[in-house]
Image (cartoon, rainbow, N blue to C red):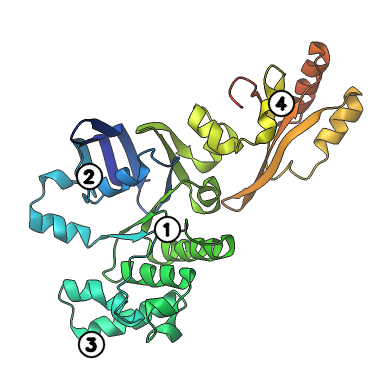
Amino acid sequence: MEPIIQIQNVTKTFTGKDNQVEALKGISLDIGKGDIYGIIGMSGAGKSTLVRCLNFLERPTTGTVLVEGRDLSAMSGKELRKTRTGIAMIFQHFNLLMQRSVLDNVCFPMEIVGVKRADARKRAKELLEIVGLAEKAASYPAQLSGGQKQRVAIARALANNPKILLCDEATSALDPTTTKSILQLLQKINKEFSITIVIITHEMAVVQEICSHVAIIDNGNLAEHGTVEEVFTSPKSPAAKKLVFMVNSQASEMRGKRCIRIVFTENSSFEPVIANMVLECKAAVNILLADTKDINGIAHGQMILQLPEDETLAAKMIHYLQERKLTVEEVDSYVG
């Protein structure tokens, strides 16, 4: 996939009165044209700083950001402003103009670049139709729900026909049902308009729902990146494992005991593999965690099992699972 954004060894240091904070530490990433790319990390990891470096709302301290092969740092102010019209952004708190109607909010970015009023209003009405809010054109933001406000923000972001849409925690303030509808809208926009979407989030479920690729940021570092399926099925870094496992109160039970993680795919997730293994090996196991995720339309499940203390019996169980083409890995060294 041809990259539309290339991030090359980007660092960002914030200097305060008494200290310096390294928010980004040598990040390098390629984001493919037309992709939906997730950047995930815990609060304070540096992901929002990174997304602001992609349109130079924050200038990197060192390193290079290329958009369609052009170095943002080498552009004049006029060139950068022109490039930014092709890089739209939506935010967690919507950032709508409260004194303007929905229609006028969507018109606003077109006004800035000099689009004629009649043309801007026509385009705004088309966009409100796309996001399902045509009947709210005359309403004001205070009259809208959170999900409706985010739909207006998305319509506004599309006003100047961007090639890239940056979403900074765009669903964090929304309930699960509304989040799902916004993600479906973003998928629709990606497919219909071939817009590259970069999603910044701390929620693994959002990445699994919509993204094809993901980068995990941890304490300013790029901990891991790859396809969502690769990272979910075989997380390698401690940060990725922590996000994938969704460590819960049961994790403490795993300390000092032999535990394995099993990954199920669409073909195996509905077979009674564990029940059959218990019958075959004539020994019980303790299920510490189990869940199923839909990743790009394919069911992927994971389960963490605490095996019997008998090494021979535990090895027999692992062999049984591997014979059935399941991904099996020991997890006691990094969970809890």
Q: Mark 3 falls on what kind of element?
A: helix
Structural crowding at the residue carrying mark 3, measured as other residues with C-alpha within 10 Å and reported as few (<14), some (14–19) or many (≥20):
few
In the image, residue 257 sits, relative to residue 277, either above or below, namely above
User: Residue beneath label 3, please?
Assistant: 118
Mark 1 belongs to which amino acid? Ala
Seen from the viewer's position, the closer of residues 261 and 192 is: 261
Mark 3–mark 4 distance (CA, rounded to whole Å):
65 Å
Lower position in the chain sequence, tag 4 or tag 1 = 1
Tell me the tag on residue 253: 4
Label 3 sits on what residue type?
Answer: Ala
- Callout in the foreground (3, 1): 1
* Residue 169 in the image, given as x and y percentages of width and height: 42, 53
Alpha carbon of mark 3 to alpha carbon of mark 1: how far? Answer: 30 Å
Name the foreground residue: 24 vs 79. 24
Q: Earlier in the sequence, mark 3 or mark 2?
A: 2
Element type where label 4 sits in the image: helix
Task: Give the Cα distance between marks 3 and 2.
Answer: 35 Å
Residue under label 1: 170
At a point 80% along the width and 15% down the height, the residue shown is 309
Q: Nearer the viewer, mark 2 or mark 4?
A: 4
C-alpha distance separating marks 2 and 4: 47 Å
Element assignment for label 1: loop
